[in-house]
Amino acid sequence: MNAIFARIEEALPRLEDLYQDLHAHPELAFQEKRTASVVAERLTQLGWDVTTGVGRTGVVAVLHNGSGPVVMLRADMDALPVREQTGLPYASTATTLGEDGTQVPVMHACGHDMHVTCLVGACEQLTAQRDRWHGTVLAVFQPAEESGLGAQAMVDDGLFRRFPKPEIILGQHVGPGPAGMVAKIPGTVMGAADSLTVRLFGRGGHGSKPESAVDPVVMAASLISRLQTIVSRTVPAQESVVVTVGSLRAGTAAAVIPDEAELGVNIRTFSPAVRQRVVDAITRFAKAEALAADAPREPKIISRYQLPATVNDPAATERVAAAHESALGPESVIAMGPNTASEDFGVLGTAASVPSVFWFFGGNDPEEFHTALLADRLAEDIPQNHSSTFAPVPGPTIATGVRAMTSAAMAYLAPSTGSSDAPAPEQSLAQ
């Protein structure tokens, strides 16, 4: 494994440049045209067969290296409508039109720029080491993970019909933790997710005469409070459930009672039965608030997306963990349980009917993380994903992500005992 990674230090400066460029130019879901172009150019130069526009803005790159297993590596590309507050010299100042047509700030607040960089780095390493393996690698750069629609869009666009069908699908995600650390999670990794829009209908009027109107803002305020009781009063205490109201839109002026209010509700669950119970409760509560307010019509509840739980194949997880221990050292691989975050990564393995493995790797300076841990200040001092101050430390995080993805791929690609007719490593990486 040391021989495979002999060139990683030489590759780091240009990968850091790539990361900083992507971080400074984030794009929202299905808007990742610049990111896709950068990725396509890099992989075309490496000699991969590149297809763009898969699932609208996705990129699929294929490297054939003789007969053998087909391994799929996935990274997501999209950013979030968050105003960056990191103070970094390469911080994003980008803005764009959001879903509602208003101008919003854009930031890579979830590390997808790191995922893209690490997959590009893994592709470089696999290209340079073609004399050590044979098979086919499918590098998938997926759009719109944050909207929950990107993986399905690529599947619907023929991901597993137009390209070689993989035998294993591998993915990773950066998060809070010391750089150099990789988590092993057999079985359930992340919960299922639902995104709902709840529209409450009132009757608009003058702010000075609320008795002549039906105020949807009051309905919304009451409903938000009521929804917080779902976890404590509607589902069993041993079940892990999260219900979040992440957005509330209503009205345009202080003296005008609007006609309607709109809530964005996010649900995280691990059990299909519990998920249905939560959705039913939201529907029941919303209708009850409308009835109590004498609203002119019932609320409308719209499902924006529904993501399945992310579940790792146990045997494949052990195989990948063994590769990670070889690449990073046994002390760098820790066991973790499931968490309530969600991903659309699971859509891919389900659609292809093949095993998949998803892991987390740390993105913080190890000394800073351990200091915060010992002081019991992780929540205060270590920014979480989706925070305006989330910023992985580039060098060691990139090195870890590249090693983790490359070693996982090599665990499935057939070892080669002879030389291939591929370009020499120096030639491939110099292009």
Image (tube, rainbow, N blue to C red):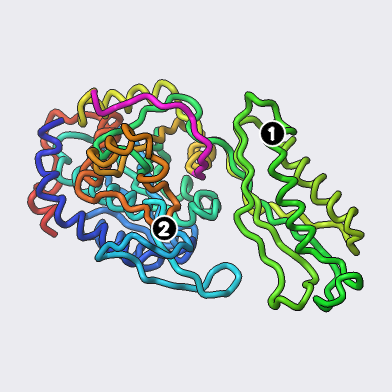
Q: Position of residue 157 (x, y in %)?
A: 51, 55
Disc 1: CA contacts within 10 A as few (<14), some (14-19) or many (>=20): few
Residue type highlighted by circle 2: Ser
Q: Is residue 246 magenta?
A: no
**Label 1: which residue?**
232
- Mark on residue 388? 2
Quadrant where the image shows the N terminus:
top left
Residue 85: numbered disc: none
Q: Earlier in the sequence, mark 1 or mark 2?
A: 1
Residues rendered magenta in the picture: 331-344
- x then y, percent, for residue 243: 64, 43
Q: Is residue 330 visible?
A: yes
The Cα atoms of the two marked residues, 1 and 2, are separated by 29 Å
* Image location of residue 171, percent across then percent down: 38, 40
Screen quadrant of the C terminus:
bottom left
The kind of secondary structure element at disc 2 is loop
Please, is residue 137 above or below residue 313 in the view?
A: below
Which is nearer the eye, 340 or 214? 214
Residue shown at the point (46%, 29%) measured from the top left: 312
Residue at the image point whose x is 40% and y is 62% from the top: 107
Residue at (42% x, 42% y) in the render: 379
In screen coordinates, is 264 left or right of 399?
Answer: right
- For disc 2, the neighbor class at 10 Å (few under 14, some 14 to 19, many from 20) is some
Helix, strand or loop for disc 1: helix
Seen in the picture, residue 44 relative to 75 is either above or below; the reply is below
Asked whether residue 58 appears in the rendered view, the answer is no
89 horizontally vs 25: left or right: left
